[in-house]
Image: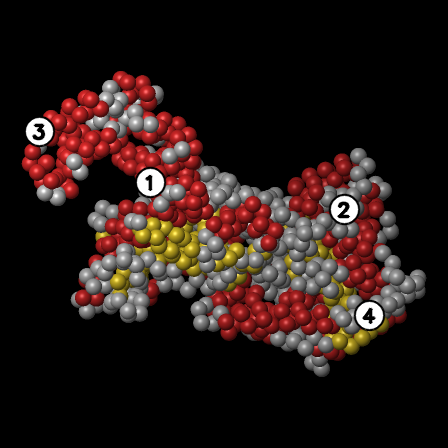
Amino acid sequence: MTAPLHQLGVAELGRALRAKTVSSTELTQHLLARVAAAKDLGAFLHVDEDYALARAKDADARLARGEAGALIGVPLAHKDIFVTRDMPTTAGSRMLEGYLSPFDATVVDRLNAAGTVSLGKLNCDEFAMGSATENSAYFKALNPWDRTRVPGGSSGGSAVAVAAGLVPATTGTDTGGSIRQPASFSGITGIKPTYGVCSRYGMIAFASSLDQAGVMARSAEDCALLLSAMSGFDERDATSVQQPPQDFHARMLAAREGATAAQPLKGLRIGLPKEFFPAALSTDVNGAVRAGLAELEKLGATLVDVSLPRTELAIPVYYIIAPAEASSNLSRFDGVKFGHRAKDYSNLIDMYEKTRAEGFGAEVKRRIMIGSYVLSHGYYDAYYLQAQKLRRMIADDFQQAFQQCDLIAGPVAPTVAWKQGEGADDPVKVYLADIFTLPGSLAGLPGMSVPVGLGEGGMPVGLQLLGNYFQEGTLLHAAHALQQATDWHRLTPAGV
Amino acid sequence: MSKNSQLVRGYEVVIGLENHVQLSTVSKIFSGSSTAFGAAPNTQASAVDLALPGTLPVLNRGAVERAIRFGLAVGAKVAPLSIFARKNYFYPDLPKGYQISQYEIPVVQGGQIEFFVGDEKKVVKLTRAHLEEDAGKSLHEDYHGQSGIDLNRAGTPLLEIVSEPEMRSGAEAVEYARTLHALVMWLGICDGNMQEGSFRCDVNVSVRKPGEPFGTRREIKNLNSFRYLVDAVNYEVNWQIDQIEDGLEIQQATVLYNPDTGETRAMRTKEDAADYRYFPDPDLPPLMIGADWVERVRGEMPELPTVMAARFQQADGLPAYDATMMTQSLAMARFYEAAREACGAPKLVANWLMGEVSRRLNTEERSIEDAPVTPALLAALIQRIQDGTISNNSAKQVFEALWTGQGTDVDAIIEAKDLKQSNDTGELERILDEVLAANTKSVEEFRAGKEKAFNALVGQAMKATKGKANPAAVNELLKKKLGA
């Protein structure tokens, strides 16, 4: 071992564990110490050392028996949106403070079965609503590249934990960009698969038609390894795609037809939507993204101009549909069955009102109100129905574009990570920054964020790659080729 | 306008029904929990039923299959694509804060129900039938001033069947409800237990002057007995007419019927109607029902009551009314068919089932499955009528004996009770002569052209023979003696 353990990725750690050059227990102890030392980053909402070490011991026993699973003994942590039996789940909300689920989310269950060792639960925006992890009801998460800046959100804790070398990989969820944007802001690799590839069972719902689980790690290869273990049909989720688990790692490695050693991406057409490169795009982001694209060209890809004419409409469409679904999904938090209940109340309505007033934060309340409004009698047709029509048109635009290309590329966000508190007074400004991630979410397409260098203030910039439905293999293959040829993904914040 | 729709105080009554039919699936509509009635509170509520964070609904295909069966039975369109929607409102026994139901596109569209009111056939069109989940129950007793919530019922599958407002009297409404109740049990999609809430009626009632547009309706909720249904409708109709006659307007409202007072009382009016913010449930893909699924269900359907009734008319020569009565329930139809098979006298079997058997069942509040007189016994009895061994009157005595368990052998009872019909013409002639001698007035009246007087003489003759004489023989002999 030359590099410190915490700098190694999932694939390397897996090899080391199977070669017994390190035990899962040693690795887990090392990382738990780092987690404890980095408490001020606000990445974890809950850490359970005893649980983690017990799991590591189990993994070491499996390894000792000669089991060869790629993830046995690999430490990770889960976004606190996934319910877990062994640790509390809060969704970043006071509403669920101390809530213990009687079951594990399917994604958690599958990663447990694969032998991973969970260190704890990761901070996030309350109910995954936000782009900076400043909406966590508990504390903010800080960007390890610059602690005065946000790490992105809503999977901010997941991004921070990976970027700060606390765990090699984390789970996240992406509704409108909540994996890709924090991955970009924190200089790591993230993937959100096609809607339906990962089961939503046990993922606390924000916007059901958009929510999708994914992975945040330090390389495309690591993402592929985790995604293989956590995806696949689940009979408990009627929207999960009826296909068996896939070996995304093998698909990532599969050589393209006509590829050469120097040009592994020969023949790959990458579409650049002109709407993703507006004049207002900050020059540092534009520069880094162009540098990434130039590397992809060197690897044999061809860049083609495409158009996604309704890109700007994705913002209002998303901010109608997502709050509409959220307003209904969050109705179950009523103080009757679980979670927070107000202490003093005079009657049922009073109990509801106080419970929800106390339990939910400002952004959640804002979205419940927007959602209730757009679904209400007399407004449904003008807002919700209209938004659904536009959503279909946005998806159609992608299919038009994919006639001319295999992948679509652009920036993840218009800027690098902003300063803490900057978005606090102007929610709409923050919503507007989601412009490049929302169209893919609305269409249900798979997407990645891949580091392509640093921008303003030495902050990381991510390249967004979007594939057509179920083209995770193509996405991972391109990202992996880029990471084989470049070192951007190896950049770490100072001191990590 | 049907002749049954008598006007009430000059007003025409307009009634439409919404029935909540609990489907007989073993597990709930969106979870694997049991639907069995009567378990200890919350022992049949899973994580999904409790709406724990992260849970998702998965549709029970058994519930869909039952909806398809119903759709086929009423000649409706089984929608190839239907949508589950969320009906959002807060209530403690509604765990998710919304009910999953079908709103804009239901699974069953159209169709009709046919039934008899008296001997008049009536056809009522259906608007739709849709699948939805039931809520839990709030328990307001024994919780130290607080309310308890039992979520065992939450997620129980319901088929809500909505009729067009085509009924014109309480009598029609109750016959519609009875027919629907019989049909869902016939199809095996509902256990029909009204006490346990498996079959609930909501009745929409309005009144209008003939020829005028529909009046404002009020909905009587949760009627769980057919008798209450008639009483509630009658009370409501008169109440509405009183209001109108007093110059007051009817407010659209939901009302409850109190069987103790016999009155209806408004629960909520339209002004406080909630905005349910319906929208398609993103957790459930559209329900797609392919032609192959429909055909498979069709292949597994029992013969429908209407089809069976037509068969009884054609093959057995039953009148339409009798055929419908014989198909009121599968058990009735099976009884009829078995008895008819054994004695070969369909009309007599129908008469007995509609007459003595139904009378005894009704007074004793029993169902035909529990009838002590089996199809074989009834057939044996009918055979003894047919072959002239006993008269109809005597047969009633035998039936009584069979029903009350005095015996299980028809011939033995006839013997024991000495009911054998007398076919001794010499003896009969002697008795008739006595009757004629004792009733000279009737004889004169008959001769003067009064047909009724003949019947009186027959009656006297039957009385004199203690009902044992063969009525046909009495008729014939009397006519001969009177020279008619």
Q: CA distance from mark 2 to mark 4?
A: 33 Å
Q: Are marks 4 and 1 in contact (CB under 8 Å)?
A: no
Q: Amino acid at mark 1?
A: Asp
Instruction: Point out which mark residue A269 bears.
Output: 4
Q: Is residue A197 left or right of residue B428?
A: right
Position of the C terminus of chain B, as image quadrant, is: top left
Q: Amino acid at mark 2?
A: Leu
Q: CA distance from mark 4 to mark 1?
A: 71 Å
Helix or strand or loop: what does disc 2 sit on?
A: loop
Q: Chain of mark 4?
A: A
Residue A346: x and y in percent read: 34, 55
Instruction: Point out which mark residue B142 bears.
Output: 1
Can you tell which of label 4 and label 3 is closer to the viewer? Answer: 3
Q: Amino acid at mark 3?
A: Ala
Name the residue: 67% across, 54% down: A241
Name the residue: 47% across, 72% down: A379
Ranked by sequence position, the earlier of labels 1 and 3 is 1
Instruction: Point out which mark residue A71 bears.
Output: 2
Q: Which residue is mark 3?
A: B437
Mark 1 surroundings within 10 Å by alpha-carbon count, few (fewer than 14), some (14 through 19), many (20 or more) = few
- In the rendered image of this protein, does residue A56 appear above or below residue A181? above
Q: Chain of mark 2?
A: A
Q: Is residue B263 left or right of residue A272?
A: left
Helix or strand or loop: what does disc 1 sit on?
A: loop
Q: CA distance from mark 1 to mark 3?
A: 79 Å
Name the residue: 82% across, 52% down: A250
Can you tell which of label 2 and label 3 is closer to the viewer? Answer: 3
Q: Amino acid at mark 4?
A: Arg
